[in-house]
């Protein structure tokens, strides 16, 4: 018992030290590189994807509910953030086809009025993001009442259909005064540095970690493992499934708002079903049921796709010039091969259902050393 407590204490201390080092590194990167640099953009997008992947893992990995509606909830959060954050004086230019829109209000300007420009803008952005998350959670609750009665593939199809209907609905011309129809929403504020993204998303992921390790998280895992046994233990299946669905959608909505910040302009067409598949891919490769797996894979996937392998589409890669091979589309072919290799050799993903920890690393090397000793002993015995 003491050993377990000491291991947890050590893991906590190491995690805090690593987070502090990460913040220091991020501060240095932000001070050295301009906001438009590819490294800054990769960090921002990867951070957003990590939050959405973790929220999806909470539902698919920890609760066992196969949902494909993540892009729809991201869409809700993105539009709520953009609509509530566009400065009042810029609305006529954004809603030029709809007489300036029906919303004549901006949260950043509202809070800047009595908190000061810098603090007020930041608070206004956070409030708009949270409202986007709450809107996604509310819609998830209403959708979940009938949809969560379905299981497996049927649930996936229903949530995927919901996301597609929602995307078409937001482009409806009659909603133009609110959503700007099929036109772009723009001119809303953004965090200039990547450190703000890391801090904010780190806080949200930490909340999910606390939830997973709570009694509710244990109930989610019990439902995933065996619904009949979980119900026999007194777990209310409908309540906990709905709770997991709503919480996952809340963080997906916040992730959608932050993705809108990253993109700079917003249109419903961006939130296609392929976005959900991309996030699901990150979850599967990282390990279904592993939060650190989703985070690590998000950064590896976005960095490879948007930066490291970009040269495969431009004719020159790692100093090798081959226009006939390295052309548009070759990058995605290479990424697909890499994914296939990972799936073949890591059936449970990179992390499986494990989490990154000092204890886990130590135990891994101990087991490896023990196997070598056993193999050596077996070999000696055979020689005798």
Image (cartoon, helix red, strand yellow):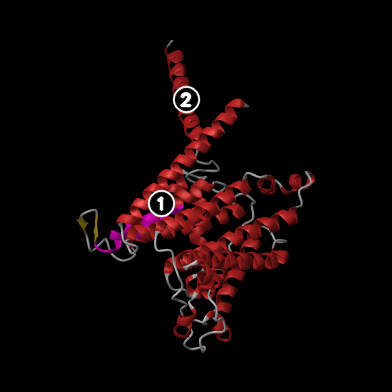
Instruction: State left or right for residue 304 relative to residue 67.
Output: left
- In this rendering, the answer to whether 157 lies above or below 55 is below
**Residue 269 seen in the figure:** yes
Mark 2 and mark 1 lie on one chain; the one further toward the N terminus is: 1
Between label 2 and label 1, give the one nearer the viewer: 1
Indicate the position of residue 116 as horizontal and vertical percent values: 48, 67
Give the main secondary structure, helix, strand or loop, of the magenta stretch. helix
Indicate the position of residue 373 as horizontal and vertical percent values: 45, 20
Q: Which residues are magenta?
A: 298-315
Query: If the image is split into quadrants, where does the N terminus sit?
Result: top right
Q: Quadrant of residue 375?
A: top left
Instruction: Report which residue position mark 2 lands on.
Output: 371
Q: Which mark is residue 209?
A: none
Mark 2 and mark 1: span between their CA atoms? Answer: 31 Å
Instruction: State left or right for residue 230 relative to residue 110.
Output: right
Query: Badge 2 local density, few (<14 within 10 Å), some, or many (20+)?
Result: few
Indicate the position of residue 248 as horizontal and vertical percent values: 61, 58
- In this rendering, the answer to whether 352 lies above or below 196 is above
């Amino acid at each position: 018992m003491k050993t377990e407590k000491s291991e947890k204490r050590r893991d906590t201390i190491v995690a805090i030290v690593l987070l502090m080092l990460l913040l220091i590194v991020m501060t240095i990167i932000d001070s050295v590189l301009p906001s438009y640099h590819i490294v800054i953009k990769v960090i921002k997008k990867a951070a957003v994807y990590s939050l959405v992947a973790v929220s999806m893992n909470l539902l698919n990995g920890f609760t066992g509910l196969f949902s494909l509606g993540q892009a729809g909830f991201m869409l809700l959060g993105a539009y709520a953030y953009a609509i509530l954050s566009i400065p009042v004086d810029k609305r006529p230019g954004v809603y030029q086809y709809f007489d300036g829109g029906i919303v004549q209000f901006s949260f950043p300007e509202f809070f800047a009025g009595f908190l000061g420009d810098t603090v007020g803008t930041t608070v206004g952005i956070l409030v708009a993001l949270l409202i986007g998350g709450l809107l996604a959670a509310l819609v998830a609750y209403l959708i979940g009442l009938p949809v969560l009665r379905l299981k497996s593939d049927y649930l996936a199809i229903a949530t995927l259909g919901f996301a597609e209907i929602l995307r078409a609905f937001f482009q409806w011309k009659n909603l133009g005064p609110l959503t700007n129809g099929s036109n772009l929403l723009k001119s809303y504020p953004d965090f200039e540095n990547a450190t703000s993204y890391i801090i904010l998303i780190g806080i949200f992921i930490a909340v999910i970690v606390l939830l997973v390790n709570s009694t509710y998280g244990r109930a989610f895992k019990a439902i995933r493992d065996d619904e009949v046994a979980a119900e026999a233990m007194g777990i209310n299946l409908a309540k906990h499934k709905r709770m997991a669905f709503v919480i996952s959608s809340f963080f997906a909505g916040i992730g959608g708002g932050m993705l809108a910040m990253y993109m700079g302009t917003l249109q419903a067409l961006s939130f296609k079903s392929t976005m959900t598949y991309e996030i699901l891919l990150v979850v599967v490769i990282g390990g279904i049921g592993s939060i650190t797996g989703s985070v690590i894979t998000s950064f590896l996937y976005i960095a490879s796709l948007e930066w490291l392998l970009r040269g495969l589409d431009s004719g020159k890669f790692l100093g090798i010039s081959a226009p006939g091979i390295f052309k548009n589309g070759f990058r995605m072919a290479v990424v697909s091969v890499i994914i296939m290799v990972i799936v073949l050799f890591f059936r449970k993903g990179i992390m499986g259902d494990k989490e990154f920890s000092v204890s886990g690393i130590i135990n891994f090397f101990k087991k490896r050393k023990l196997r070598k000793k056993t193999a050596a002993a077996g070999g000696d015995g055979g020689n005798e």
